[in-house]
Amino acid sequence: MTSLYLHIPFCARKCPYCDFFSTDRHSPALLAEYVELLIKQLKLAAAAGIWQEPLTTVFFGGGTPSLLTPHQVGRILQAAAARFDFAAGIEISLEANPGTLSPQSLAGYRAAGVNRLSLGAQSLEDQALAQLGRIHNAAEIRQAVAWSRAAGFDNLGLDLIYARPGQSPADLERELVAFLALEPEHLSCYGLSVEEETPFHALQRRGGLALPDEQSYARQFTLLHDGLDAAGFHHYEISNYARPGRECRHNLGYWRRQGCLALGAGAHAFDSSGWGRRLAVPGDLAAYRRTLEMGRDPLVELECFDRAGAMAETLYLGLRSAEGVDDRDFTVRFGESLSEHFAPAIARAGSHLHHENGRWTFDLSGWLIFDHLILPFL
């Protein structure tokens, strides 16, 4: 199976915690030009013949894809459908900032073929939204959800950032109740992290940003799990929860190490042939334009895996998810069982790693210290 990812590296305003490639310098003319460049790259990728399986998912990520007009989104989807088979029931997701939406734009996205919407809410507290540099307030989030439902979106996800400066478990519990009142099908819950070369990193170095300690972080992580589990959500990946059957299929493809064609400056792709290789488009809009004007695909190879690297990455990605790693599939793929190849790492993981019904999975406490437990497997 193959997915298509389109990176839209434009924002109304760059968030101080974000380290993805994006810029708040844009205009209608630049966005229109970028759409043409995406379509040009799409044609080159189709001609290369590497990505031949039907597309099972399409994902517009960013940045803020909802800065594109419905007509532009539709043009991209039409160009993709003209060159790649769309699988029956294809999932087409669009990330959207609540502050950029209207009833008309949402109806337009739905008519263009988008059938899954991911709203970057991040919080339902106005003070927190201002702290996070968001352009919307809590009332606009609620309005965007109502407009989305009216436009016909029945697969709606919300993002939530927790472990924010000054946030207590009681604060998070109150906010979770507010998120659940919006009745989303999906919630992505990310603990706030400070990445290098972001404004938050500079603020932290000056002593102006204090995140909750590890104990408070763990309490909030567990609180989210317990609260969402009680509300009927499936905790299917470290940071992701869904109603049954509403898991993001595009992201599941990442954790299953399935092929993904990626378009746009700053996008990352995965070619699943052989042991696999990772590719990326450099995060440089001028270089992206120049390369395509010369008739060349800007995707460049980052890493070509050998057998050992593919085995390690299969564990790294698979153990992030609730479905884990299938023993039989692993043995067929690599000619060696997981327990044979990773015996010392399994022993070090101890009771956090479970082997049941032919699958290896981490428990909740294992997910909480995932970065520590996964190191021996790499």
Image (cartoon, rainbow, N blue to C red):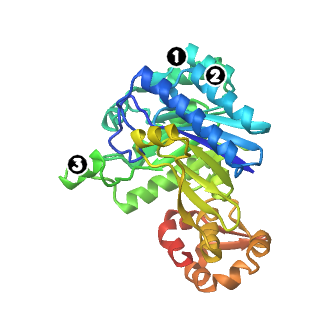
Which of discs 3 and 2 lies nearer the camera? The answer is: 3
Q: Are marks 3 and 2 in contact (CB under 8 Å)?
A: no
Location of the C terminus by quadrant is: bottom right
Q: Secondary structure at mark 2?
A: helix
Local packing at callout 2 (Cα closer than 10 Å; few below 14, some 14-19, many 20+) is some
In this view, the residue in front, 155 or 113, is 113
- The picture quadrant where one finds residue 92 is top right
Q: Label 2 amino acid?
A: Arg
Q: Residue furthest left?
A: 206
Q: CA distance from mark 3 to mark 1?
A: 34 Å
Q: Is residue 145 above or below residue 240?
A: above
Q: Earlier in the sequence, mark 3 or mark 2?
A: 2
The residue singled out by tag 2 in the image is: 149
Local packing at callout 3 (Cα closer than 10 Å; few below 14, some 14-19, many 20+) is some
Q: Residue at x 59, y 46 (%)?
A: 262
Local packing at callout 1 (Cα closer than 10 Å; few below 14, some 14-19, many 20+) is some
Q: Label 3 amino acid?
A: Leu
Q: Position of residue 132 (x, y in %)?
A: 34, 38
Q: Secondary structure at mark 3?
A: helix
Q: CA distance from mark 3 to mark 2?
A: 38 Å
Q: Residue at x 65, y 75 (%)?
A: 307
Q: Does residue 208 appear left or right of residue 259 in this picture?
A: left
Q: Earlier in the sequence, mark 3 or mark 1?
A: 1
Which of discs 1 and 2 lies nearer the camera? The answer is: 1
The residue singled out by tag 1 in the image is: 102
Q: Position of residue 55 (x, y in %)?
A: 73, 43
Q: Position of residue 360 (x, y in %)?
A: 69, 70
Q: Label 1 amino acid?
A: Ser
- The picture quadrant where one finds residue 254 is bottom right
Q: Is residue 186 above or below residue 210?
A: above
Q: Is residue 213 above or below residue 114?
A: below
The residue singled out by tag 3 in the image is: 203
